[in-house]
Image (cartoon, rainbow, N blue to C red):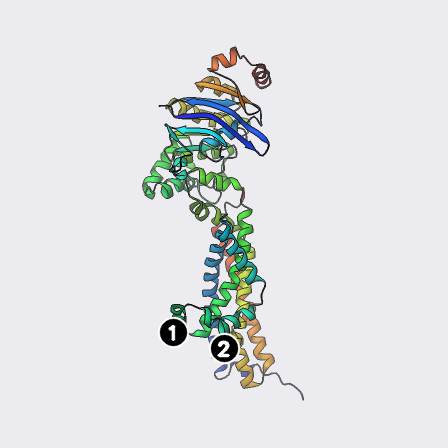
């Protein structure tokens, strides 16, 4: 049987709308997860570098655990398996949310945080020790020196690897369809099921992911160029 | 009461005995120059005063209070002691102005406006009032070191430590930094200066100590030091350096 391409059908009726809805969900889910992952990742890095043994061990175990297990399994764990170990108040809060959406965000941000923590640690280690020394010598505490002197320089250095973590997160967010989040891939699948035009449906979703990634990458580099131009040279 | 008292201080790096039984007293407003060959322990000694390095034995007191006391807040101690490093160590991601206002605003909680007014006045004083909004990389070495001095002075320290402040500078920039240090000395700042600038030592030091292999071998006024050194090692060093 000959396959007949039909691009028009993708944009007929409701289908165009479905893609847009899916894209919106993907963007919202990725956006929230990126922010949470950055905060959590930074926190882990500070623990990792704190020189306080139990905190260091916690951070190391966290990072190794989340980096070395499949994201798919983590998503299923949070969705199907975490119920008995979550504290009551948190569960109550969770059930008031869109549970699939919230679970996907938890899984994506906790997973990505582990990678960000490693990137950030290497960024921090590349800042000369004399920067910490000079700031501590003026009376700044360790945390103040981190916040105002070390981290701003480290983030600048790790912007390229950070971009790829962000892009990975956006792409990984497609796994959320497996627990029923109606994001872009889920919607493409729906369009395919309704139209039997899988090639067109997934080509469109592929192109949307591609443009999204290129756009994010472009924006961050522009930001970097404009606002963080000076000061990386030493 | 003396500003700084150093009592029987010993320090080791592993097996290496870097400070051997150091005793020294610095009065308020006194300028003490520490000289000696590299590896003699002079930088280490200075860095022990604000606890960038910890000593193994002995005691250091600032205005009579031990800096190792349990109730001594280390950040508070450091806020009262300025230090200027060989490599300037300015914050490359901040403007000159923000380099100077950071610690006053975050440690002493001084409001931004007041901190900036003070910073601009200090920049004026070190002769680079027009560079406030530049980044460190845009300045020459001599200018960067003057910013570093202003950054330390912004905390209104009781003591200023200088750890070879001119050693990383091109020769034509050394004087601009030294002249700022001379002004400071004349204004009555208590200063500990590790330096090889013997002209500076002769002109502004109240006393000079000579260190070698972790020991103070010679101490005295500049006049004694340059005209009548007692120790053979000092004589050899002066011959090298003058």
* Chain designation of label 2: A
- Corner quadrant of residue A91: bottom left
Please tell me whether residue A115 is drawn above or below residue B222 in the rendered image: below
Q: Is residue B149 visible?
A: no
Question: Which mark's residue is nearer the viewer, 2 or 1?
Answer: 1
Q: Nearer the viewer, residue B47 or B135?
A: B47
Whether residues under marks 2 and 1 lie with C-beta atoms below 8 angstroms apart, the answer is no
Instruction: Work out how far the residue at label 2 is from the one at label 1, CA to CA, in angstroms.
Output: 17 Å
x and y percentages locating residue A222 in the rendered image: 51, 56
Instruction: Work out which residue is located at the far bottom of the displayed protein and give it.
Output: A1
Disc assigned to residue A38: none
Residue at the spot 49% in from the left edge and 73% down from the top edge: A79
Q: Which of marks 2 and 1 is nearer the N terminus?
A: 1
Element marked by disc 2: loop
x and y percentages locating residue A234 in the rendered image: 54, 41
Element marked by disc 1: helix
Q: Quadrant of the N terminus of chain A?
A: bottom right
Query: Are the numbered discs 2 and 1 placed on the same chain, yes or no?
Result: yes
x and y percentages locating residue A105 in the rendered image: 47, 68
Which residue is label 2 attached to? A180
Q: Which of A220 and A103 is in front in this view?
A: A103
Which residue is label 1 attached to? A96
* Chain designation of label 1: A
x and y percentages locating residue B131 in the rendered image: 43, 37
Residue at the spot 48% in from the left edge and 55% down from the top edge: A42
- Corner quadrant of residue B60: top left
């Amino acid at each position: 049987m000959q396959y007949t391409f039909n691009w028009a059908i993708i944009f007929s009726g409701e289908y165009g709308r479905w893609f847009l809805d899916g894209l919106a969900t993907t963007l919202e889910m990725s956006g929230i997860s990126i922010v949470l992952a950055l905060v959590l990742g930074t926190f882990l890095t500070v623990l990792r570098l704190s020189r306080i043994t139990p905190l260091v061990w916690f951070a190391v175990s966290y990072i190794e655990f989340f980096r070395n297990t499949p994201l798919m399994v983590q998503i299923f764990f949070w969705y199907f398996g975490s119920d008995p170990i979550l504290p009551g108040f948190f569960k109550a809060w969770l059930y008031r949310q869109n549970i699939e959406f919230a679970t996907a965000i938890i899984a994506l941000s906790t997973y990505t945080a582990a990678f960000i923590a490693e990137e950030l640690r290497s960024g921090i280690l590349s800042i000369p020790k004399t920067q910490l020394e000079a700031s501590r010598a003026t009376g700044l505490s360790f945390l103040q020196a981190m916040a105002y002197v070390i981290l701003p320089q480290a983030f600048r250095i790790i912007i390229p690897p950070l971009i790829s973590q962000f892009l990975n997160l956006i792409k990984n967010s497609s796994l959320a369809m497996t627990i029923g989040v109606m994001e872009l891939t889920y919607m493409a699948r729906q369009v395919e099921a309704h139209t039997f035009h899988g090639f067109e449906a997934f080509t469109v979703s592929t192109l949307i992911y591609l443009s999204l990634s290129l756009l994010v990458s472009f924006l961050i580099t522009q930001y970097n160029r404009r606002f963080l131009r000076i000061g990386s040279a030493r | 009461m003396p500003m700084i008292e150093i009592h029987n201080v010993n320090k080791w790096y592993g097996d290496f005995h870097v400070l051997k039984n150091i005793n020294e007293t610095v009065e308020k407003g006194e300028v003490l120059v520490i000289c000696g060959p590299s590896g003699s322990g002079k930088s280490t000694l200075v860095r022990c005063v604000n606890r960038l390095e910890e000593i193994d034995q002995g005691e250091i007191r600032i205005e009579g209070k031990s800096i190792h006391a349990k109730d001594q807040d280390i950040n508070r101690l450091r806020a009262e002691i300025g230090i200027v490093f060989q490599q300037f160590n300015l914050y490359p991601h901040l403007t000159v102005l923000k380099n100077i206002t950071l610690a006053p605003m975050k440690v002493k909680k001084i409001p931004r406006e007041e901190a900036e007014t003070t910073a601009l006045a200090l920049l004026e004083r070190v002769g680079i009032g027009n560079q406030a909004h530049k980044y460190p990389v845009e300045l020459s070495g001599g200018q960067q070191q003057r910013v570093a001095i202003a950054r330390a002075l912004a905390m209104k320290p009781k003591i200023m430590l200088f750890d070879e402040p001119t050693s990383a500078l091109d020769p034509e920039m050394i004087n601009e930094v030294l002249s700022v240090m001379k002004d400071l000395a004349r204004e009555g700042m208590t200063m500990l200066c590790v330096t090889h600038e013997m002209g500076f030592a002769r002109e502004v030091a109240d006393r000079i100590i000579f260190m070698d292999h972790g020991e103070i071998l010679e101490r005295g006024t500049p006049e004694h030091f340059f005209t009548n050194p007692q120790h053979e090692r000092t004589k050899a060093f002066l011959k090298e350096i003058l």
